[in-house]
Amino acid sequence: MIEAAQSSIDTSSIDTSSTDTSSPKHFLLFAIGSAGDVHPFVGLGQTLKRRGHQVTIATCGYFRPLIERVGLGFVELFPAEEYLGLLGDPDLWHPTRGPKFVIQNAITPNIRRVYSMIERLYEPGMVVVASSLAMGARVAHDKLGVPTATVHLQPIVLRSVAQPGKLMGLIAPPWLPRSLVRAQYWLADVLVVDRLIGPELNGLRGELGLPPVRRSFDGYIHSPQLTIGLFPEWYAPYAPDWPSQTRLTGFPLYDEHDVAQLGDDVQKFLDAGPAPVVFTPGSAMTHAAPQFAAVVEACRHSGRRAILLTRHPEQLPPSLPPEVRHFDYVPFSQLLPRCAASIHHGGIGSVAQALAAGVPQVIMCMSHDQFDNAERLERMGVGEALPPKKFQADRLAATLDRLLGSPKVKTACREIESRFAGTKPLEDTARLLEGIH
């Protein structure tokens, strides 16, 4: 049985400034998921390329235009049609069925694909960098000895009994004995995770002459060489029972700002009146018509202006009032500094951009890591959660009034914004990766 290391992490030993970059490497980056999951790897790939390395990103064909546009190598892990087909299933965002949906449709089908691609492409000097969902990379590390790092975008992926995050189905108040938290993780693994992942994962391992793995989310999901969390320690402090090879570098904040501009129509709308609020249910959401309607209605009654962001406009109301505009996509790093608040689904990328811009957030958490992110924002005093069933025009308007009218919230937002000054998380991440052999 493969378990995570249970050792204390001395953060003072983290040194990202001494790596020798004299030998260029070929980095093969695996990114599985929506735009919010792929963007960080694009930003990381660009950073590695600037530092003299060859970079190839393996992901869905849907993201090929972006990756090739920024000058990085691309290999298709699975076709765009498969990705777009998954977006149409409402189970993707269901609070309890969502995680099972991701395991069955994103993790399990790609275990063998990732392994086979590494086996085919690996050459001396190559380093594999795998996202949380690319578990086939761990199999390749075990069988082929491929140098491998795991990159996690969300803190909730790094399980902790000592400092448990907020996960749907996990009951972990501070007073609960830690043994009961551990028991809940065990039950989830044995009753759900092992049954969904085990046959495919251990089927492949058996073919390769490797022993079976149990409780893959408890430790096997992390590379034993290096596990990187792309979030800062002030957002999710190191837990004493995280794997000892874990390093945190910070939010990547890549959002296509180098290839997508505000545009004249966006600029004109921003210049035409008070700072608007922004709403996006996430790039992969196609079932948010009630939430778009609620935002429009809340703004209509409160006199606020709003920008709605989605590449799936069929979710929008048939007509929008003059104070509300829709755009397919606008980089948050350029947009949010000119906005009053960000209303979104609680994805880690949207959370990070709003924190960097110093604006309050309303989180419509639905599934996955969103509950954990919402709770962290509430503890920091920079946002409030408003679940889908309560995401109604009157409640949304009242929540915005409360956040935007609070000097305490404004101060907290500005203090968090100041923490981004002078940080270079992608450079720090690149230096760590350069040290893998």
Image (spheres, rainbow, N blue to C red):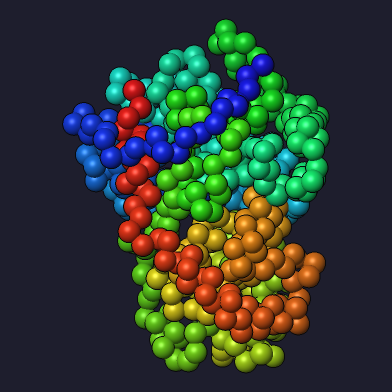
Residue at point 24%, 46% (across, down):
50
Q: Nearer the viewer, residue 75 or 151?
A: 151
In the rendered image, residue 225, in percent from the top left (x then y), is placed at 45, 25
Q: Is residue 351 above or below residue 360?
A: above
Spot the residue most to the left.
Answer: 22
Report the quarter where the C terminus lies. Answer: top left
In the rendered image, residue 433, in percent from the top left (x then y), is placed at 36, 34
Quarter residue 107 falls in: top right
19 on left or right of 404 = left
Residue at point 51%, 53% (across, down):
234
Spot the residue most to the top.
Answer: 209
In the rendered image, residue 20, in percent from the top left (x then y), is placed at 23, 31
Residue at point 36%, 48% (across, down):
426
Quarter residue 404 falls in: bottom right
| Residue 2 in sight here | yes
Q: Is residue 260 above or below residue 204?
A: below
Q: Nearer the viewer, residue 434 or 235?
A: 235
Q: Nearer the viewer, residue 380 or 113?
A: 380
Q: Is residue 189 above or below residue 364?
A: above
Residue at point 60%, 88% (across, down):
304
Q: Is residue 33 above or below residue 358?
A: above
| Residue 133 in sight here | no
Q: Nearer the viewer, residue 17 or 126?
A: 17
In the rendered image, residue 101, in percent from the top left (x then y), is placed at 71, 42
8 on left or right of 293 = left
Report the quarter where the N terminus lies. Answer: top right
